[in-house]
Image (cartoon, helix red, strand yellow):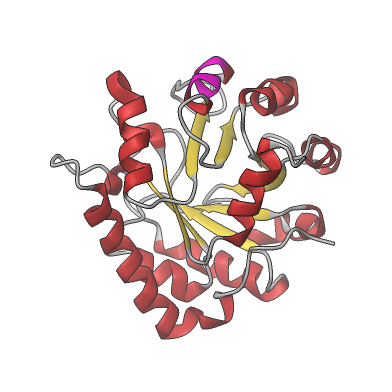
Amino acid sequence: MPSERTERLRRWDGAPAPLITPSLLDCDFARVGEEIRALEAAGVEALHLDVMDGHFVPNLSYGPPVVADWRAVTDLPFDAHLMISDPARYLDAFVDAGADSILIHLEAVPEPADLLERIRGRGCRAGLVINPPTPWAAVEPHLDRVDSVLVMSVMPGFGGQQFQEAVLEKVRAIRRARPALRVAIDGGINASTAGRAVEAGATQLVVGSATYRPDGNYAASLGEVAEAARRGLEGGGAAAAGAGASPPE
């Protein structure tokens, strides 16, 4: 029978673009289980996990035991963004905890081929992340080894930062280089910026602080982002509408 991860990845791969993945970094950590159930009720297809080590980025978040606790309360796919200096050391722990997609920073692992192979060998999707100062050309040699690329539109480590418009040219370049690749963007994504990101070719939007309205109506907050993304798709991102669902050959 298919494994639980296989079933989650089928859900992940089959989700229509642009895929909106709320980050749990800005949720109420005193009641994460309730927050996850509220996000499920709002119709989200996957969750983004921001893992920070206080070294690669100047902040700490959570590790594999916490991820394992969250896995016990949801079958949503987990997209684990490892903002850590030594992802190889902790890879197996995050996979065993229930991560379905593992994203590593090119700035932390300049020669990522072996680690990407390890990730996919564990049955997970593998992705690379690049920070705003990193040129898209740095990731170009690795595009045939990844299932996704995450373009940071802020410097990682803290939520609530302002969107950096200049990174959209990197999204466009990656989309031109690999039209079927899932291209995600993370940082300052909200109803004001989602349309521009999708128009540039993003097929996954990581939404942080814009998700969590005080009234708890996450369907409304994420619906506003989805509507902006739809307009961006109609405005120029139509070529990306079917992109990002298939792993590389």
Image position of 49 (left or right of 143): left
Asked whether 188 or 216 is in front, the reply is: 216
Image position of 28 (left or right of 7): left
Principal secondary structure, stretch drawn in magenta: helix
Extreme residue in the left direction: 215
Identify which residue is drawn at 60% across, 61% down: 14
Magenta residue check for 165: no
* Residue 208 visible in the displayed image: no
Magenta residue check for 68: yes
What is the span of residues highlighted in magenta in the rendered image? Answer: 65-69
In the image, residue 116 above or below residue 199: above
* Residue 37 visible in the displayed image: yes
Q: Quadrant of the C terminus?
A: bottom right
Asked whether 247 or 179 is in front, the reply is: 247
Asked whether 76 or 102 is in front, the reply is: 76
In the image, residue 59 above or below residue 153: above
Identify which residue is drawn at 65% across, 63% down: 245
Image position of 218 (left or right of 91): left
Q: Position of residue 210 (x, y in %)?
A: 28, 49
Q: Position of residue 223 (x, y in %)?
A: 28, 61
Extreme residue in the front direction: 1
Identify which residue is drawn at 29% across, 47% down: 211
Q: Position of residue 217 (x, y in %)?
A: 20, 47
Q: Quadrant of the N terminus?
A: top right
Asked whether 3 or 199 is in front, the reply is: 3
Identify which residue is drawn at 63% across, 57% down: 13
Q: Position of residue 71 (x, y in %)?
A: 53, 27
- Count of numbered labels shown in the rendering: 0
In the image, residue 97 above or below residue 77: above
